[in-house]
Image (cartoon, helix red, strand yellow):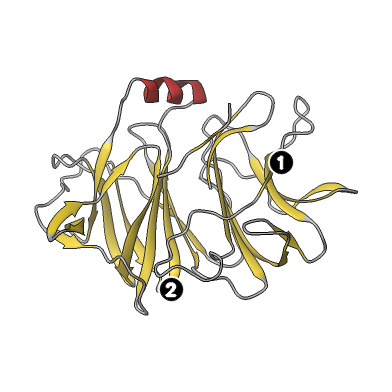
Amino acid sequence: MRTRMWEKAGFCAVLSACAALLSTAGCGTKEVAPPAQVYVGDTAGPDLGAFIITFAPGAATYEEEQAWAQQGASNQYAVVVDGAELVLPNLGMPEPVVLGEGSEAGIGYLPAGPHHLAIAAPNGSAPIFAADLEIVAGAQNQLYLYGPHGAIQGRFLTYPSQPAAGTLHVSTINLVQGGATVEVVSCTRDSGCTSLSPPLGLGETFQADYPTTALDTWPYYTMIDGSVLGVRPVPTAAIPAPQVDQLSAGYTLVNPPSQPDPPANMVFAPLYISAEGSFLAVFE
């Protein structure tokens, strides 16, 4: 059964945005979640950037992740920026931003410029991840957290909140543990699929912009030459023709919302792959 998760190192090919491999918090760090709090913005502005966090499950396999979820287990973390815990307005009462493992959340809007980020348990324990980020105004600033428990890594990607007219933006990252590789492809009915990206291992990314035209209705797109973009596991001798997932609109944080359609940002982050070569769970 296919699952799509919502609420949701190596080569880095970046054609139209920036990507940075970020450090993990050391076990001996003394940084803790402080009592200070700051409200996160909920509306875009000229000096603000949208901030999204995607937190992949720590389980190495799909079966382990499902068993963990059925037990009702839940790891919750606070988001700390520049020494202050991020909070949301809630009828005048601050409500801490809570990040759950296996979730994707639009955190809100942060001032453009450098910031220090930490992800920590609300009880003030040492953070599981910390890094310096550069928030870009007018952009989707997306942090991916991935890897096994106790060894969380991060990848930070930015791309314009609204791609140029007549183009779509593709942003792909491989979050599959265990050595599987994936690739972005262009497919046609007559000639099959052609690789657009190199093989992407765990934590590796690919971003690019392509000329496009709408197919029927949002959110499906095709390129000017008639091909369709997708992502698939890299073919192997055992699985020479893996399943291709067509790209469609990714999770985006745009407030006020775009009209008439959301931006053509196509985001794909696979989490688990079956033995037959199909994606079992993805963030998109």
Q: Which mark is residue 138?
A: 2
**Whole-percent x, y for residue 188 in the image:** 83, 51
Of 202 and 211, nearer the camera is 211
Q: Residue furthest left?
A: 35
Q: CA distance from mark 1 to mark 2?
A: 32 Å
Q: Residue furthest bottom?
A: 46
Seen at 62% across and 26% down, the residue is 274
Circle nearer the N terminus (1, 2): 2
| Up/down of 139 relative to 270, above or below | below
Seen at 66% across and 69% down, the residue is 167
**Whole-percent x, y for residue 209 in the image:** 64, 66
Of 222 and 174, nearer the camera is 222
Q: Quadrant of residue 111?
A: bottom left
Seen at 27% across and 60% down, the residue is 116
Q: Which mark is residue 244?
A: 1
Seen at 17% across and 48% down, the residue is 31
